[in-house]
Image: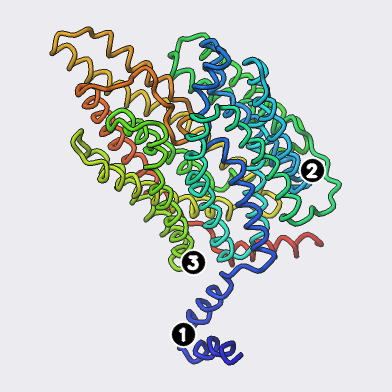
Amino acid sequence: MSDVPGPPQPGPPQPGPPQPAIRHTSRRSALTQQEKRLVIGVCALIAAALVSTATFNYIVLPMIMSLDASESQQSLLRQLPSIGALLMIFIAGVLGQRIGPRRLLVWCGLLMAVGYFVVMVSPAMGVTSAGMLLGSVGQEGIFVVSVGMLSAGLADPKARASGFAMLAMATPLVYLVAPVAAGALVGLTGWRVVIGMWVLAGLAAAFLAKRLLPPDEASDTRVELWTPALAGFALACLVQTANNISQAGWAATPTIVWGGAAILATVGLVVLMRRLPEPSLDISVLRHGGFRLLLVVILLVPFASMAFYATVGAQFVYGYGVFATSLIMIPVQVTSLAGAWLSGRMIRRSGIRATGTIALVLTSVALFLAATQRVSTPVVVSLLIVCLYSGALTAANAPMTNAIMNLAAKGSEGSAAAFRGASASLGNAIGVVIMSAIVFSTFQSSLTASIQASGGDVSQAVSITTSLRDGVSSEQVASQYSVPMTEVVAADDDQQSAMVQAYQVQGIVGGAVVLVAALIFGLYRGPSAPKRSHRRRRRVTAEPK
């Protein structure tokens, strides 16, 4: 008991006002029991929802071959997870207000389990596609509502810093285990067993939401769903337009159809937003200039995608198999965990802006270091660079999420989380279009030159490039692990050299883009907590008047 009064005593004698403030925030950084329960519940839900994302690329090819999918069905399968997610992304924020976030999370977990169960037992691609769509809708609902619920439940800035740092650990924890398990299970038992993992994850999410999250407050809110549904549909069409530009070109029929649908949906959304007296799609957060800047940062960061191309290199240049690739990525995930932990401590000590800027600059440095890679570079050196990239990027996620959720007014956390997710999805899709074009055009150009110099068949370069590009959709890049290559069994020296040159270009371009994101984040100055509290109090006192 004598230790309890010790810490406060040195505080008052210290001259100047900053000391008591620092001690106060330091003590408050510890989470209360209720806050710990909320954070653990949200992290567990996010982890459960991430299982399918982390293992998606391991079941794509086995599923396609098992169900004898056509080329169009293969393309649709790769795009369905992102379509389902984007259709749900804005609806989730609104439904959370309408039926309560905990109830919605339980439903989303069950929907995830039902959808993936349909995939697990499906006899044909049509049934598989329907199940994949349902599962993706439930998964995205968990992502959006969980982040909004965490932000709403952690009002204190220091507690919020701890909460979002713990949330950032969820991704590397899942990627530490799930890909290794999937790589082993696919080879031993088949892809349906991996889908069974997804079903169990959905059931676990529903159970954990019911047991760990606080009960919903009574609400008689009635909101329309047309505006969030149209917004999600427009975004899904826009992302699919970008995906089809990457795969089929600007003038391809799918590109034109998706682009036209995006325009029509956007026009319909604008008309509804103007005519409805109280549209449920909350765009008030977009009026804050800082919020828009942060959305740009979140959009730019996915352009790097270094982890995905690193796994391509592990297979193509170093000759590792699927399971071996998942094993050598374990140190990368451990570094990510360390980055998330360090990020939380830095936010509490140095603030959100400094932490995010430093982490993004280090991410950019790692990408520029990737440009120094050669075919002869030892795999340990390449792995260390990927570790630096992954650790720094994970460290940046917590302050980026923290900053954007800090700007959400009370009751608008779901909307802010939805716009955050939408920006990340759009950035991922656009990044795939730009980076895959740069990477694979560099690869094809280098390989073509080598084949011409040796008097070989130039069409071989086109064939190999096409086989590699087929595995690059926004969903598969988000999975971080490349699709196992079947057409390119053993790469010769020319192919390895071409891939390394493509990797170098990816590092330079990705590093430059992330550096721009770091500069934007560094220039951004968010409102301080006291000012936000003052504005809230002023609104409350003004209402009775």
Pointer 2: residues within 10 angstroms few (<14), some, or many (20+)? some
Kind of element beneath mark 3: helix
Q: In the rendering, at what x and y percent does residue 244 appear?
A: 48, 18
Q: Nearer the viewer, residue 489 or 466?
A: 489
- Which residue has dot 3 on it? 348
- Image quadrant assignment for residue 227: top right
Tag 2: residue type?
Arg
Q: Residue at x 39, y 43 (%)?
A: 329
Question: Toward the viewer: 351 or 59?
Answer: 59
Horizontal side, residue 151 vs residue 336: left or right? right
Task: Specify which label sits upstream in the sequence, 2 or 3.
Answer: 2
Q: Which mark is residue 362?
A: none
Which x, y percent locates residue 218? 85, 52
Above-or-below relation of 420 to 153: above
Give the vertical position of 347 relative to 476 (above or below).
Answer: below
Q: Nearer the viewer, residue 296 or 103?
A: 103
- Looking at the rendered image, the quarter that the C terminus falls into is bottom right
Q: Earlier in the sequence, mark 3 or mark 1?
A: 1
Name the disc covering residue 98, or none.
2
Q: Nearer the viewer, residue 297 or 1?
A: 1
Disc 3 to disc 1, C-alpha distance: 21 Å
Residue 252's x, y, as percent?
A: 48, 10
Q: Which mark is residue 16?
A: 1
| Image location (x, y in percent) of residue 255 | 51, 14
- Relative to residue 498, is residue 523 depicted above or below? below
Quadrant of the image containing the N terminus: bottom right
Give the residue type at disc 1: Gly
